[in-house]
Image: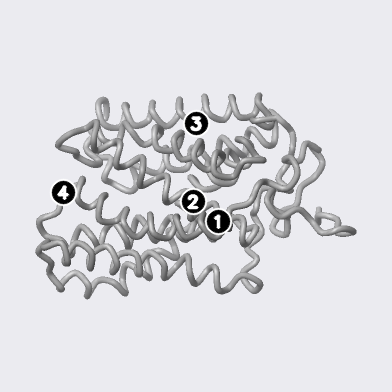
Amino acid sequence: MPIAHKKGVAVFLIATFGISWTWMYCAAEVLQLSLVNPLVQLPFGLAPALVAVVVRRWVTKEGFADAGLALRFRKNRRYFLMAWLGPLLFAVTGVAAAAAAGSRTTMTPWVTTPILMAMVIPLIPIYWGEEFGWTGYLRPRLFPDRPLLSVGATALIWAVWHYPLAFFGYVEFGNPLLGLLVWTVSILFQEVILAWLYQSTGSIWTASLAHAGNNMVLFLLVGQVLPDSTSMSITLVATIPLALAACWIVATGRLRAIQGKPLREADISGGFDAPSPDRPPAAGRVPRH
């Protein structure tokens, strides 16, 4: 089956896009609020997770045993460390590449790096809103036996979900079509990394941490260190290290097909020790209720 739980996926997509896009329009055009404001972003940022919860609980009744809610920190400390430090390494790599190409840089913004790195931690639950929906729910249900196609389809849908932000003042591209294309490619590479973290740890929290870091450290630092940057140039520079990391993940075969179909039993609820859809429980292990 190319799509598991077709009804659930359809409801998830319709509800997530409907809620998110309606809120974006109302916030920007009716209420005249700035979508750059983090508080204004909350409703559409959390919409994917909230819809995924509703779908899991009441539409497909499959429960949460494959939701990846387990923190698994002790077993996956190195992945959490990579998810936290990776965006900073990406920023350094991207800025170095831009400087080598002749871009003007300033060192002053690097002073704020410790603050940005610290801010990432409390923001993890916010970015969980997207990861629990897109990477945790949608991706394992699209082409589960073809990992690259699964990630590509998820990234494309996730990118389209972002598109209204380019027309409501969140980002400004001089050439909207080209800008959206570059943004889509950037999201594709990012989803490869997020999916790999999720598969490697069985925890949605590593992907949420990396997503928070990419937004708060990678993209912010690139924009600050390159004073002449635009939305287009920031996206391009940030995409360079994302592409390198994603290509390494794919080339080394670290993306795997989903092992087994997402669970259907309504009474299975794995809570914070649940197996992920990519790493089913070992023989003899019963998900904790």
Q: CA distance from mark 2 to mark 4?
A: 25 Å
Q: CA distance from mark 1 to mark 4?
A: 30 Å
**Identity of the amino acid at label 3?**
Thr
Residue beneath disc 1 = 196
Residue at 52% across, 24% down: 14
Say left or right for 62 vs 176: right
Say left or right for 289 vs 164: right
Q: Which mark is residue 16?
A: 3
From the viewer's perspective, is residue 262 above or below residue 104? above
Among numbered discs 2 and 3, the one appearing first in the sequence:
3
Say left or right for 167 vs 69: left
Give the structural element (helix, strand or loop) at label 4.
loop
- The percent coordinates of residue 87 (x first, y second) are 37, 64
Q: CA distance from mark 3 to mark 4?
A: 29 Å
Residue beneath disc 4 = 230
Residue beneath disc 2 = 192
Among numbered discs 3 and 1, the one appearing first in the sequence:
3
- The percent coordinates of residue 39 (x first, y second) are 34, 46
